Amino acid sequence: MNFLTHLFLSGNTPEILVGNLMGDFVKGGLDGRFPPGIKQGILLHREIDAFSVKNDHFLRSKRRLDQSFGHYRGVLIDLFYDHFLAAHWKDYADVPYHVFISDAWRILRAHKEFLPDRLKHIMPFMFRNWLPSYSTVGGIAATLRRMSRFRLKRPNRLSEGAEALNKNYGELYNDFRKFLPELIAFSESKLIVANNKDKEANIFKK
């Protein structure tokens, strides 16, 4: 999953949110490297990714894209699903989207001593530019052009991804609508609060 979905699935525990966003930037063992809550968030990130890549709805979405995208089909679906979440945010969360983004950025800045340097570098762009634009296809197109040029060393077709989104929009959105409730249920089952292991406060809309 991409940045927004990981933030969304973090519940209301700040350290878990920090760790969940850090997941793509931290490799290897975690013992002794981070506070318990951040470690739990990183582990949650890994669990979410492992669940997603095996999920039937996610796999169906990948198959809808042209095979010439190769293994980048998964990258595209991650980002497309972030788009659907942002575009239909009110269906899934009670907190307004702009408030959620602002609160998440504040939490991350408060824990900056634990953040990997690469995440620190991109965070201002992520919260000022990328996440606010995810609700539009134009914003996704701009993100894909940026990824194609600057994040990936190999030749790739990511810059053409917005065309694939438009071409398969309805079908991909239907996949997402079936996928997200399953992912939310899975994530909620993994969220644990130290003093209350049975009831995790979260932003998920009931």
Image (cartoon, grey):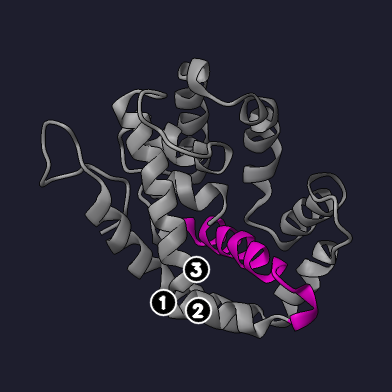
Q: Residue at x 47, y 33 (%)?
A: 104
Q: Amino acid at mark 3?
A: Val
Of labels 1 and 3, earlier in sequence is 3
**Mark 2 vs mark 1, CA separation in Å:** 5 Å
Label 2: element kind = helix
- Say which element carries label 3: helix
Measured Cα–Cα span from mark 1 to mark 3: 15 Å
Residue 165 in the image: state x and y as whole percent: 71, 73
Look at the image and tell me whether residue 170 can be seen: no
Which disc, if any, is residue 175? 2
Residue 199 left/right relative to 176: left
User: Quick check: marks 2 and 1 in contact, CB under 8 Å?
Assistant: yes
Which portion, as a residue range, is magenta? 66-89
Q: Compared to 98, does 178 lie above or below?
A: below
Is tag 2's residue or tag 3's residue first in the polypeptide sequence?
3
- Give the vertical position of 16 relative to 90 (above or below): above
Residue 24, quarter of picture: top right
Query: Is 129 on the left or on the right of 4, as rendered?
Result: right
Residue 77 in the figure: left or right of residue 143: left
Q: Amino acid at mark 2?
A: Asp
Label 2 crowd (10 A; few <14 / some 14-19 / many >=20): some
**Residue occupying the point 47% across, 56% down:** 89
Does residue 43 appear left or right of residue 172 in this picture?
left
- The disc label shown at residue 178, or none: 1
